[in-house]
Amino acid sequence: MSALAVYAFGDIYTTVGNAIKKGDAKALSAHFSSKVDLTILNKEDVYSKSQAEQILVAFFNKNKPSDFKIMHKGVSKEGAKYAIGNLKTTNGLTFRTYFFIKSHMGSEIVHELRFEKE
């Protein structure tokens, strides 16, 4: 893939990270697989893309992001990419944030997203 193609599509970590930083549930869910494993605090379930988006809208409304930084990223033994970051909110909370990415039909999709209170 050319540098131009990589630039045009952007890096999945940057794209997902920017959506989290902005609290943009719609932009974030655009990168979800059809079913996504979503954990917010102690509530964990598998949701459809649209259900997950609605849950994230509510989460971001309650916890308006002020900053998000990826602290670590890597690739698991199975080949799944992942990132761990910190989401800071305007209400003073920090959430440890994890997202896991798999390749699916030539594109990278988020199949798991977790927000845990720091």
Image (cartoon, grey):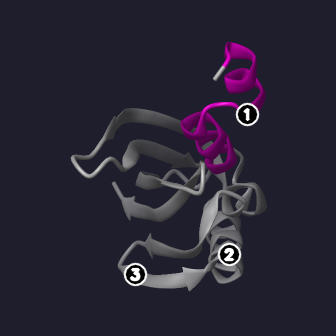
Using the image as rendered, state which of residue 44 and residue 90 is in the foreground: 44
| Farthest-out residue, left | 77
Residue 58, numbered label: 2
Which span of residues is magenta-colored?
A: 2-21
- Above or below, 86 against 99 in this view is above
- Residue at 45% of width from left, 35% of height from top? 70
Q: Mark 3 belongs to which amino acid?
A: Glu
Name the N-terminal-most of marks 3 and 1.
1
Instruction: Kindly report the secondary structure that dominates the magenta region of the rendered protein.
Output: helix
* Earlier residue among tags 2 and 3: 3
Instruction: Name the residue at 68% across, 48% down.
Output: 19
The residue that mark 1 highlights is: 9
> Is residue 108 within the magenta segment?
no
Give the image location of residue 69, x and y in percent.
Answer: 50, 34
Residue 101 relative to residue 6: left or right? left
Which amino acid does the dot numbered 2 rest on? Ala
Which residue matches tag 3?
A: 44
